[in-house]
């Protein structure tokens, strides 16, 4: 982007098309602040068009550190210049509001749009899917179908994601089959990944494996990681080994694979295999990603918040001894509570076996 900016600054005459290219470049690179600042400069020198607003709205929607007021001001300019009737701008506007969590404004923009296109319907469905609102996703999806608007691959991905989050496995499977058979849409790696994750979370590992085997060109990293995670959750060693083998072929240095397999073996009492994975991890020079804990110990004298970060084995903190002492105490308490829980469970089983409890 630095080279693009230099080339732009060297231009004798800057037309809106060149401004649009720079704004779009910043937005696509995740440089939302730069995109917005460039937009503010652009409108002082040239008349913005629908592509100008489309790019800056995309930047505002993606930026959590940018005030929504920038979006509402753009909205006012859009209405003033008459671009609110443009399908591209209308879709970008409702998508911006949706990404920023203002669903009521998104719905208002949708209802006022002169044309309800496939893009605008999909934008609303995707927005509710991001917010985990399964009921609204299905409501909007069914309305879309009733309006004779045909869904595309992005629409289905959003609906399948919502099904997965809600645990609506059979509905998700039904929609996936409909996408392929009724709408002749070729599933993308993202669709397969969504289905594998959905089935795996529900413990339907055989179906998840079947789905993995259907992926043209074989499964990618995210699919196998999801499958391995589900294998660990449900204790399926055999399928976990297959997933781990595929993952290590793709990414030999991924610590997550080693850790998940070592834990899976350990939970099944296969200590030798667990040790072998840990040993292989050391031999490969793979470092486990350190998990940090952050604790608000106390407020500073001036009232500001004081946060302390520490990790396992770290002795660099000035209060390291106190921290590890407290952590050890908490660990002992957890162990004690767990032992008591097991004792109560065994006691209950014994009483039930002799007919004392039903």
Image (cartoon, grey):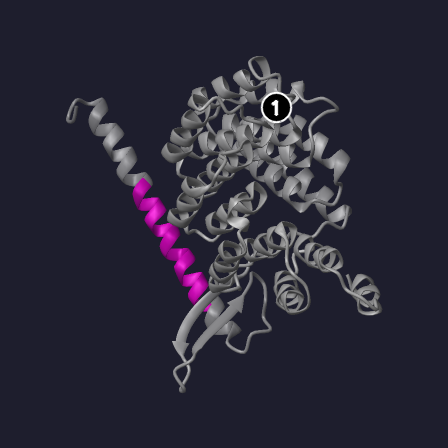
Q: Residue at x 74, y 45 (%)?
A: 253
Residue found 49% across the figure and 54% down from its top: 79
Residue 163, image x, y percentages:
45, 29
Q: Magenta stretch containing residue 155, yes or no?
A: no
Placement of 178 over or under 48, stated as above or below = above
Q: Tell me the quarter of the image containing the C terminus.
A: top left
Is residue 137 visible in this depiction of the protein? Answer: yes
| Image location (x, y in percent) of residue 301 | 40, 86
Residue 336 sits above or below residue 40 on the image = above
Secondary structure type for disc 1: helix
> Which stretch is magenta?
325-341
Magenta stretch, overall SS: helix
Residue tagged by mark 1? Answer: 238
Task: Between residue 185 and residue 333, name the one nearer to us.
Answer: 185
User: Residue drawn at (47%, 53%), measured in percent from left and top?
Assistant: 100
Q: Residues within 10 Å of mark 1 (few under 14, many from 20)?
A: few
Residue under the point 53% across and 64% down: 65
Rendering coords of residue 234 (x, y %): 49, 29
Taking depth in this image into account, of 225 and 16 the one nearest to the observer is: 16
């Amino acid at each position: 982007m630095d080279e693009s900016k230099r080339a732009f600054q060297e231009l004798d005459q800057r037309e809106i098309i060149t401004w649009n290219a720079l704004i779009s470049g910043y937005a696509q690179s995740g440089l939302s602040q730069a995109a917005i600042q460039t937009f503010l400069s652009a409108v002082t020198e040239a008349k913005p068009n629908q592509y100008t607003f489309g790019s800056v709205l995309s930047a505002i929607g993606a930026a959590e550190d940018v005030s929504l007021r920038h979006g509402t001001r753009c909205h006012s300019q859009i209405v003033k210049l008459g671009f609110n009737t443009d399908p591209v701008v209308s879709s970008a506007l409702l998508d911006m509001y949706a990404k920023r969590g203002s669903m009521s404004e998104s719905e208002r923009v949708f209802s006022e749009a002169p044309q309800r296109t496939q893009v605008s319907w999909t934008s609303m469905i995707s927005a509710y899917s991001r917010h985990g609102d399964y009921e609204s996703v299905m409501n909007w999806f069914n309305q879309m179908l009733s309006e004779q608007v045909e869904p595309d691959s992005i629409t289905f991905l959003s609906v399948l994601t919502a099904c997965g989050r809600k645990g609506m496995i059979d509905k998700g499977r039904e929609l996936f089959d409909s996408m392929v058979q009724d709408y002749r849409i070729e599933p993308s790696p993202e669709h397969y990944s969504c289905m594998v994750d959905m089935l795996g979370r529900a413990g339907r590992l055989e179906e998840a494996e079947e789905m993995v085997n259907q992926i043209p060109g074989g499964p990618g990293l995210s699919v196998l990681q999801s499958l391995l995670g589900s294998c660990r959750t449900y204790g399926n060693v055999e399928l976990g080994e297959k997933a781990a083998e595929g993952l290590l072929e793709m990414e030999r240095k991924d610590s997550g694979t080693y850790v998940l397999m070592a834990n899976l073996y350990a939970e099944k009492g296969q200590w030798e295999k667990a040790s072998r994975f840990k040993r292989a991890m050391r031999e490969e020079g793979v470092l486990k990603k350190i998990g940090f804990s952050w604790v608000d110990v106390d407020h500073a004298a001036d009232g500001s918040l004081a946060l302390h970060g520490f990790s396992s084995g770290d002795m660099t903190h000035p209060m390291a001894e106190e921290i590890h002492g407290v952590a050890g105490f908490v660990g002992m308490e957890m162990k004690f509570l767990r032992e008591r829980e097991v004792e109560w469970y065994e006691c209950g089983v014994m009483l039930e076996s002799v007919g004392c409890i039903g």
